[in-house]
Amino acid sequence: MSGMSLDLMMFFLFLAGLFYFGLRKSKKVASEEGYLLADRNTSLFSLTATLVMTELNTATLLAFSSLGYLAGGWAMRLPCIFLIGLLFYALTVAKKWKEFDRTSVASFFSERYGKGIGIFASIALLLGMVGFSAAYVQSIYLLFTPIFPNLSPWLLSGVLVATVLVLVVRGGLISIIRTDVFTFLIAIVFFPLMAYFSYRSSFGEATLSENPQLVLPFKFVLSLIVLTMFTYILAPWYGQKIFAARSKKVAYLSVIFSAVIVFLLYGMGVMTTWFFRENGGVAPSSEQALPFAISATLPVGLRGLGYGILFAASATTLTGVWSAMSSLVIGDFFSNSENKGPRRGVTLTILFALTSFFLANLLVDKVFDKLILANIPVAALSFALLGGFYWKKASSAGAYVSMIVGWGWALFCYFYYGVEGGYIWYWAMGGIPAVFITGALSSILFPNKSIVYYY
């Protein structure tokens, strides 16, 4: 058997396992509660596994590993973004979200501040998730271009999106969690092997990385840490899975465990491309460094498994976002409907899959830039969320003003400074404090007549 044949066999065997766990018993999911929230009975291990695989997406992995290829060991600072961001999530909102325990995180804003702000929050979170999902589709396409170089972007990404959709469209969150557990068990073994074989590889004379501090300034990493801290607390795909937890303790511990595991797995991705270039490996572009390192350094058979795992990492993240979008729309706009079956969730999931497919091919070029940009609608809600949970004086006026200031400042920084001018630094370090200061002052000056809060 040739090396390519063995790789393809391993890839399709892994894919078969993924389909088996995703589709198994999916026809038994007969309620909307089961489809969207897995009956709110997810165990600690399953929740940890699905949170890890939700965060371990190919878009971020390709972006981090591309900077590992360019900046070497300096890029090992990047995984700290999610270690700190997710630990902040665990400490501030994990138990709070489980106490709230609705269908969507956006429902919190309607209940705490009124329907008007709830609609604003829902639209902002939907816009953010549309941007994220389009970037994830583009990352899957980039992952498979070395294998199918002659296929057009539309055709290849279309086949990949359709494959992902089949995995979960019938079983909803229950199918997502099952495929996440399956992929997680294999990924925690594969990623160390991937870094090890890259470390042991040799392609002749070593190639030097570019100046790491120019490629990846420290203030860029710091700004991403701040943004992650104050956007992930609002992430609907995290909130939906926290609602699916068996208890508050399960929700809290699973986020802590996932923070550490995500940090380690992303770190191994960075090390893979760092070792690959230091050992003389060359990729046609930094964003393709990881798939080329996998092709060049892993043994036959393991390469096919590697592509399967990376596909699954993208698939489970993408389906998690689609499911969260469906949950948000149903929870915030159709909650009074008498329809309690899974049909609405299925229809919305298909609709959001098509939306992300078209936007990925029409608008997304640089994956990492678009991932960061998609955070703009979300970060502005951070005062309204934390104030709503922890400060009973947080008012509707404070929520409105803080959102407007957050969106306005982010857009100003993006258009005035631009990507090359480091707008992220000015946005994060100026925008987040401004959101909280203006929100607090407006709440004091224009208090609510009645207060609803969650402790």
Image (cartoon, rainbow, N blue to C red):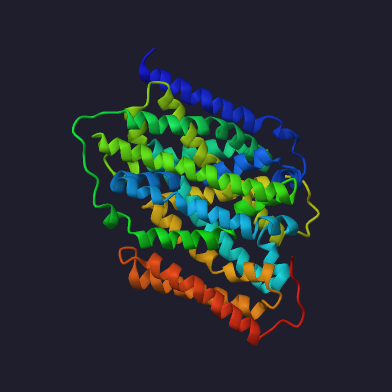
Lateral position of residue 255 relative to residue 217, left or right: right
- List x then y, in percent, for residue 420: 30, 63
- Which residue reaches farthest bottom? 445
Lateral position of residue 381 relative to residue 98, left or right: left
Q: Nearer the viewer, residue 146 or 98?
A: 98
- List x then y, in percent, for residue 330: 70, 56
Rendered image quadrant of residue 378: bottom right
For residue 24, above or below residue 84: above
Q: Residue at x 45, y 55 (%)?
A: 371
Q: Nearer the viewer, residue 65 or 23?
A: 65
| Residue 318 seen in render | no
Rendered image quadrant of residue 343: top right
Lateral position of residue 279 relative to residue 405, left or right: left
- Which residue reaches farthest left? 205
- Which residue reaches farthest right? 338
Q: Residue at x 78, y 60 (%)?
A: 336
For residue 300, above or below residue 122: above
- List x then y, in percent, for residue 193: 43, 29
- List x then y, in percent, for residue 70: 29, 47
Q: Residue at x 68, y 67 (%)?
A: 389
Give the quadrant of the C terminus: bottom right
Q: Nearer the viewer, residue 79 or 47?
A: 79
Rendered image quadrant of residue 413: bottom left
| Residue 66 seen in render | yes
How many callouts does the rendering have?
0
Q: Residue at x 72, y 34 (%)?
A: 27
Q: Nearer the viewer, residue 348 or 300?
A: 300
Give the quadrant of the N terminus: top left
